[in-house]
Amino acid sequence: MHPSENVDETGVETPTSDPETPTIDPGSDNLTFDDETENGPTTETDAIGSFKIIRCKRREHGAECMMKCADAGISCQGGRKHPYKSNVKAGLLMQCRALGLASSCWYYYEDGDMCVFVIGLPVRCGYEGGIPD
């Protein structure tokens, strides 16, 4: 019998879906969590290997969120001008993420846009609408 055929099925562990494991949406560069909901985790640092994410509640957007990101080792400004629209008030930092050495800063603007700034990559913006939690 070949060694690969000699497997005791009682000792084989089947991976289960872990809600804390990030997945990548094939249509975008966004990482999502299986358990992520509209009011999902907001201010906790989730460490998965070298992945960290800080989501700030609406009342924490800006300087307070900047401090939470800094405490997690992620450097972001508290506010940032819209990269494509000069007539929109500066956006406030709402979340930051780090994956290894790469980090991103996410800003929400009054017109409903959300822009993601990643060093060395073009800024990505999209209309999200509504008001984030």
Image (cartoon, rainbow, N blue to C red):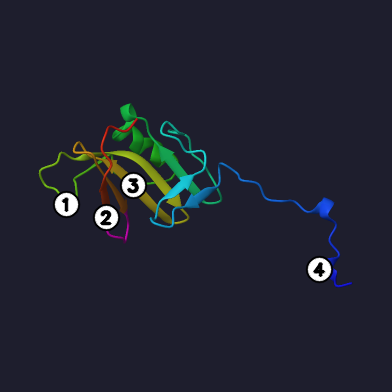
Q: Are marks 4 and 2 in contact (CB under 8 Å)?
A: no
Q: Amino acid at mark 3?
A: Cys
Task: Name, please, the residue furthest toward the left.
Answer: 87
Q: Are marks 3 and 1 in contact (CB under 8 Å)?
A: no
In front here: 113 or 96?
Answer: 113
Residue at (14, 48) in percent of width and height? 85
Q: In the drawing, does residue 95 fall left or right of residue 78? A: right
Spatial CA span between label 3 and label 2:
10 Å
Q: Earlier in the sequence, mark 3 or mark 2?
A: 3
Q: Amino acid at mark 2?
A: Val
Q: In the drawing, does residue 29 fall left or right of residue 51? A: left
Spatial CA span between label 4 and label 2:
49 Å
Q: Are marks 2 and 1 in contact (CB under 8 Å)?
A: yes
- The residue that label 3 is drawn on is 105
Residue 123: give its label: 2
Spatial CA span between label 2 and label 1:
9 Å
Spatial CA span between label 3 and label 1:
16 Å
In front here: 69 or 111?
Answer: 111
Spatial CA span between label 1 and label 4:
57 Å
- The residue that label 1 is drawn on is 84
Task: Name, please, the residue furthest toward the top.
Answer: 59
Does the rendering let one see residue 76? no
- The residue that label 4 is drawn on is 4
Spatial CA span between label 3 and label 4:
47 Å
Which residues are the magenta region? Answer: 118-122
- Give the quadrant of the C terminus: top left
